[in-house]
Amino acid sequence: MLKKDLRVFFKTKRNSLSENDCKELSLEIANRSLNMAIWDYTNYHIFFPIEKNNEIDTQLIIQIIQGKDKNVVLPKTNFNDKTITNYLLTDATLMTINEQGISEPDSGIKINEDQIDLVFVPLLCFDKFGDRVGYGGGYYDRFLKKCSLKTIKIGLSFFEPIEKISDVFLQDIKLDYCITPEKIYKF
């Protein structure tokens, strides 16, 4: 299927989940992440969910990262140039809600892309080859291109993979892993 069709299908599918379903599936994903050999790094980039879009509750993974005394790095979206600036989450970090309803840092300690060890990547769906469909702005593809080649990219999905996304582009960055409530996929 084409990305535009997949976006419509998976937005509808995700929006059909109840609040309780989202909480339970998010907990399964967070628990599954504990089975991965990914917790020896320092800087973990993760997004806050857009709750109105029934996104995965990443607060659970953030608690795991903090519980392991690792750094949580949060994105701040620049809608004018479609880029992401990264900030370290500290006790002093001031958070605001942006125009898309995403909680993000207002300011703070900037972290360069090449300092990020692991990125939890938002998505609507993914395929068996590690390609993903996001909301279509290209923010994460631009951001991931600036990260080190060693940076681990992990998608988080309520749903299992589709067979193949038919309109993948060269500039699309593949995932290394994707965590679902049922399984961890490695690409």
Image (tube, grey):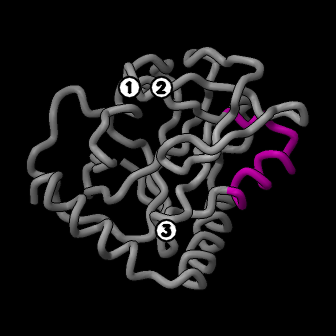
Q: Residue at x 65, y 72 (%)?
A: 27
What residue did someone put label 3 on?
Answer: 54
Q: Are marks 2 and 3 in contact (CB under 8 Å)?
A: no
In depth, the one of 4 and 163 nearer the eye is: 4
State which tag comes first along the sequence, 3 or 1: 3
Q: Is residue 65 above or below residue 1?
A: above
User: Is the residue 174 above or below the residue 108 in the image?
Assistant: below
Figure quadrant of the N terminus: bottom left
Identify the residue shown where x is 51% and y is 31%.
77
Residue at left 14%, top 60%?
5
Q: Which mark is residue 78?
A: 2
Give yes or no for residue 64 being in the magenta stretch: yes
Span highlighted in magenta in the image? 59-73
Query: Which residue is the site of mark 1?
Result: 82
Q: Residues within 10 Å of mark 2 (few under 14, many from 20)?
A: few
Q: Position of residue 99 (x, y in %)?
A: 50, 42
- Of residue 13 and residue 41, the one placed in the foreground of this image is 13
Question: At numbered mark 1, what does the secondary structure look like: helix, strand or loop?
Answer: loop
Q: Amino acid at mark 1?
A: Lys
Q: Give the amino acid type for the residue marked by disc 2 in the picture.
A: Asn
Q: Earlier in the sequence, mark 2 or mark 3?
A: 3
Task: Nearest to the eye among marks 2 and 3: give it.
Answer: 2
Question: Residue 134 at x, y = what percent?
Answer: 33, 48
> Is label 2 in contact with label 1 (beta carbons under 8 Å)?
yes
C-alpha span from label 2 to label 1:
6 Å
Closer to the camera, 186 or 85? 85
- Position of residue 138 relative to residue 129, above or below, is above
Badge 3 amino acid: Asn
- Residue 18 is left or right of residue 39, and the answer is left
